[in-house]
Amino acid sequence: MAAETIAASTRAILAGHAALRARLATSLRAGRAAHACLFSGPSGIGKTAVALEYARLLLCDKSGSQPCESCMQCEATRTLQHPDLHLVFPYPPGAIKVKKSGNEPEEIDESGIVDKVSELIASIAADPFTATQIDEGESKSKARARLFSHSVRLPQIRSLLRKVSRRAYQASRKVYVIFHAESMNTQAQNALLKALEEPPPDGYFLLVAENDQDLLPTIRSRCQLIRLGKLNSEVIASALESDGVPSEQASIASKLADGSFLRARELSTQELSALQTDVIDYLVESARCDALELPKTVQKVQERLYSTDRSYFDFLNLFFRDAALYSALAKDASDKLVFRDLEDRIARVGKAYPEADFDAVMNAVDKSAEYISLGYTPDLVLYALSVRIHQALGRRAGKAPKHRMDN
Ligand SMILES: [Zn+2]
């Protein structure tokens, strides 16, 4: 058993955060571990993986730099089923009922959601890149939009605080992990604050949030802030490859993913070669700027445009980055190209447009992606971008400085 139960890709991502994990383990061994930590950073970079590994380390009987994977605690925490490991997730509205009985503290009734929580915990144990919220069987984009209505509520925090006062059952410590901690409202945060101010000697709180600034300053000041940065593309590519993604595909997806393994994994399942063909067609038409042909190309792109994400524009920019590199370094650029299999085409762009201003092209592409995300009509944005690309590429080698619209 042991370590191979952790997916190879997760191990690769954890390795990408090695320095930070080593610091956490060192403080723990030195008896200086903070009782409240706030793990923050953008989506898809492995916050959950790092926080949960640390939770397991806190509960492990040995004091190594990683969970030993052989003690009784590690056996249990591997599936995240440990009586001293408490995981708190944002719930959708109406998922829990609050039972009040006289002066007794209120109890929450989670019976309606208990199966979904167990399912979620099993999914996260198998893959820490699972969204850490209750899925309601919706499409991913819908679920993402609904995340804002999911929250960690005051009754959940109160229920957690009642557990805090109890002794650890099995390990020498107790760990409370709160996912999407920023979804707690002010009341819930204030309730938690009391426990953070006077934590029990064996209690450790791990808060996970995309942006630590979304939490109250009082909460932040009680936590050791652990900021996780974007992953570099080599780490992402190696994680994808260890999941069986072919190396070329892994390399492209990792460069399009803006430091997010999750995003890269989604991209790696897309038809990247189809996207590549679309992009090249669009570029060729943009370069020609044929007033009659361009609308057709734009139409085609629009039909295929993966409008919910930036991949189309990121792809364009990577292509131009390659072209700029090739113009500057020629053959020396070969092994630095993202699209190595397109080297001939990339070389031709540089030759055909000796005066090209690739920086201007890339700026225009970034602007266009921004306009699309702001809700501008894609065909207008793409049409305008074509004209900008045409202008920035400049005169075509061996041609008089005029284009076909003048004919
Ligand atoms: Zn252990």
Image (spheres, rainbow, N blue to C red):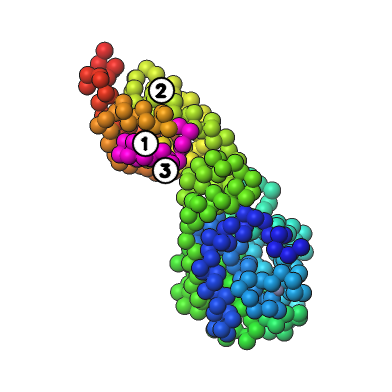
Query: Are dots 1 and 3 in contact, CB under 8 Å?
Result: no
- Total of numbered circles in the picture? 3
Q: Residues within 10 Å of mark 3 (few under 14, many from 20)?
A: few
Q: Kindly report which numbered mark, 1 or 2, lies closer to the viewer in this rendering.
A: 1
Q: Quadrant of residue 403?
A: top left
Q: Residue 336: which disc?
A: 3
Q: Which residues are magenta?
A: 323-342
The relative height of residue 54 versus residue 90 in the rendered view (above or below) is: below
Q: Is residue 363 left or right of residue 81?
A: left
Circle 3 SS class: helix
Tell me the amino acid under the disc marked 1.
Lys
Tell me the amino acid under the disc marked 2.
Pro
**Residue for point 52% across, 37% down:** 306
Please tell me which residue lies in front, 23 or 389.
23
Q: Residues within 10 Å of mark 2 (few under 14, many from 20)?
A: some
Circle 1 SS class: helix
Q: Residues within 10 Å of mark 1 (few under 14, many from 20)?
A: few
Q: Position of residue 186 (x, y in %)?
A: 52, 71
Query: Are dots 1 and 2 in contact, CB under 8 Å?
Result: no
List the residue tagged with mark 1: 331
**Residue for point 64% across, 73% down:** 57
